[in-house]
Image (cartoon, helix red, strand yellow):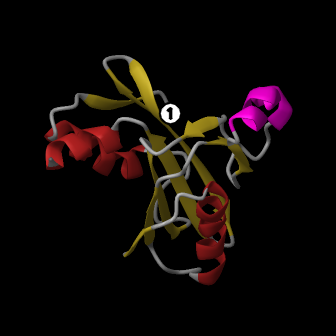
């Protein structure tokens, strides 16, 4: 598996990297990590203007980026770690989010954070959602990506 830890905090670059990796590495298993500066990432089928406060976004210079997968809008900032698993379609069930959320949950549980998968694609701690996950399938490949506001601060605290 190829591990990529993006040095960029540019949401346009990081979201575009997912598509680039999908096209340039059609058979490679990839795990991509990235942290974005303040940005709103909207799902493929969402009405962007219905999801954001345009005046606030413009005033605060928050980037708005559309991703290739469906799902809801999410807010990213420097305290938020984003992860993206790329694998061949068919190696894992497209409807099953547990395979790729398990490593995230295991890591958090090992750090003492009681995280769990609830519903189809949400990660929760004490009943509160901290991560949503979405998938897409294209050109024989599947990408599952998620976001987590709890991982960065917990890892920073553990490593200081």
Q: Is residue 151 visible?
A: yes
Q: Is residue 91 left or right of residue 15?
A: left
Most frequent secondary structure within the magenta stretch:
helix
In this rendering, the answer to whether 9 lies above or below 44 is below
Q: Looking at this view, is 160 or 2 the one in front?
A: 160
Question: Is 49 one of the magenta-colored residues?
Answer: yes
Give the percent coordinates (x, y) of residue 129.
Answer: 44, 25
Q: Residue 6's x, y, as percent?
A: 46, 67
Q: Quadrant of residue 70?
A: top right
**Whether residue 47 can be seen here:** no
Q: Residue at x 61, y 72 (%)?
A: 22
Q: Residue at x 48, y 79 (%)?
A: 28
Locate residue 71, reporting x and y percent: 66, 38
Residue at the disc numbered 1: 120
Quadrant into which the N terminus falls: bottom left
* 138 vs 130, nearest the viewer: 130
Magenta-highlighted residues:
47-60
The residue lying at 22 percent from left, 31 percent from top is: 113
Q: Position of residue 69 (x, y in %)?
A: 67, 50
In the image, 100 versus 15, the foreground residue is 15
Residue 56, compared with residue 26, is above or below; it is above
Q: Residues within 10 Å of mark 1 (few under 14, many from 20)?
A: few
Q: Left of 7 or right of it: where is 38?
A: right
| Extreme-top residue of the structure | 127
Asked if residue 1 lies left or right of residue 28, the reply is left
Is residue 132 magenta-colored? no
């Amino acid at each position: 598996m190829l591990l990529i830890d993006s040095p960029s905090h540019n949401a346009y670059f990081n979201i575009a990297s997912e598509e680039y990796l999908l096209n340039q590495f059609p058979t490679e298993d990839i795990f991509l990590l990235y942290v974005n500066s303040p940005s709103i990432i909207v799902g493929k089928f969402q009405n962007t203007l219905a999801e954001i406060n345009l005046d606030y976004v413009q005033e605060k210079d928050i980037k708005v980026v559309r991703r290739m997968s469906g799902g809801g809008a999410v807010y990213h900032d420097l305290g938020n770690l984003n992860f993206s698993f790329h694998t061949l379609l068919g190696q894992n069930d497209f409807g099953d989010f547990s395979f790729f959320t398990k490593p995230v949950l295991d890591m958090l549980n090992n750090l003492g954070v009681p995280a769990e998968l609830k519903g189809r694609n949400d990660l929760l701690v004490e009943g509160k959602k901290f991560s949503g996950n979405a998938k897409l399938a294209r050109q024989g490949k599947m990408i599952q990506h998620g976001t987590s506001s709890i991982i960065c601060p917990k890892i920073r605290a553990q490593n200081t």
